[in-house]
Image (cartoon, rainbow, N blue to C red):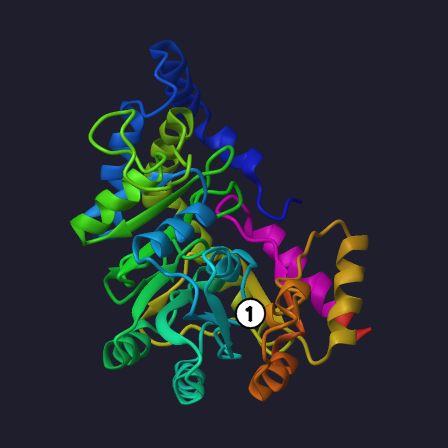
Amino acid sequence: MQFRDLTRQYQALRPAIDEAVASCMASGAFIQGDPVVKLEQQLAQYVGTDHCVSCANGTDALLLALKVWHIGPGDAVFVPDFTFFASAEVVAAQGATPIFVEVDPRTFNLDPAALERRIATVKEQGQLRPRAIIAVDLFGQPADFGRIGAIAEREQLLVLEDGAQGFGGAIGQRRACSFGHIATTSFFPAKPLGCYGDGGALFTNNAEWAAHARSLAQHGRGLSKYEHNAIGLNSRLDTLQAAILSVKLKAFQNSELQAVNHFASLYTNLLDGAVLTPYLPQGFSSSWAQYTVLFASTAQRDAAKLRMAQAGIPTMIYYPSPMHLQPVFAHLPVDEGLTSGWGRIKVCLSLPIHPYLTDDEVAHVCSTLKQAIND
């Protein structure tokens, strides 16, 4: 059993993927070919934004957004404490200061009430300028953008939606990667929509920001190839990856998102009462980048993880350390709430989830987990 089985996906989509790859190879247009333009249009239409700018990876997409907004030294950017390192790394890379915020222990996403407290503290201290909020769609579920957006508007802050795991999730009829002033996603192979290498994209309704991001992704390019108006990056999505992603996006829309939600529902039904299963607020839907459950204790979680490994069932711990305990951020002040909040979410374990599972496999995972708990 694979944690996220890309081999099964390839076998299911092989004819279309092979044709797309062969067409790309025959064209010889390996950089900025037509498939890139086509994919950007498809992605923008699916998400529901005016503009999509593809790039080399999800981290670059975040960095490009901060560069477009001229985030830099002296700026405070509010980041959830429970996320992948890149969400905070890009802030520090720009010379700004990440301010870590507690997450909701039910959804694992940024806690709006804690965000308000942290903004007030930074303003009271007066050492940094509050500039932006990075709200992560962790595990596939969008953050609470209704409340976060209201806070941002009141405090005149920019919102960057980190949808690396959230692509395909939604609040009501509105899809993830459309909620921030700028949103980003990742096409890392294990993501809900993944390519066969690295890739990413930035989404916005602001034409000026989109043009600036596109320029920055190509060395700050101006009107001609050798005119440069800014210090940028070399961050382009390969034509080959774009061709593959167009095939995968079609499958994602037609069957994969529905399938992964079926298996998530099956997990929830079979594990009811054994562990604390994922919480979806009313009106929210997830693309299930991960299916993460909570145990009664760290010891119980670790024992279950070991038992499942012995049974050939892969599991993952996302994430073993919060941002405020990363060595590179040891110099930053720690809010008391971060320490107490982390204690509530360090008992999580992510189970295998992808659109090409079978009902029997899910049942096997669940029975093994419950046996581990009962022994």
Image position of 105 (left or right of 348): left
Residue 319: x and y, percent?
63, 64
The picture quadrant where one finds residue 329 is: bottom right
As helix, strand or loop, the secondary structure at mark 1 comes to: loop
The residue stretch that appears in magenta: 350-371
Callout 1 crowding tier (Cα within 10 Å): few <14, some 14–19, many ≥20: many
Decide: is 277 above or below 46: below
Q: Is residue 267 above or below residue 243?
A: below
Q: Residue at x 71, y 69 (%)?
A: 370
Locate the C terminus by quadrant.
Answer: bottom right
Q: Which residue is mark 1?
A: 82
The residue depicted at 22 percent of the width and 43 percent of the height is 211
Is residue 343 or residue 74 the one in the foreground?
Answer: 74
Q: Position of residue 225 (x, y in %)?
A: 28, 25
Type of the residue with mark 1 = Phe
Rendered residue at 30%/58% (across/down): 69
Residue 195 visible in the displayed image: yes
Residue 168 visible somewhere in the drawing: no
Residue 349 belongs to the span the image colors magenta: no
Left or right, 233 with respect to 331, comes to: left
Location of residue 183 by image quarter = bottom left
Q: 130 or 259: nearer the eye? A: 130
Q: Is residue 102 left or right of residue 210?
A: right
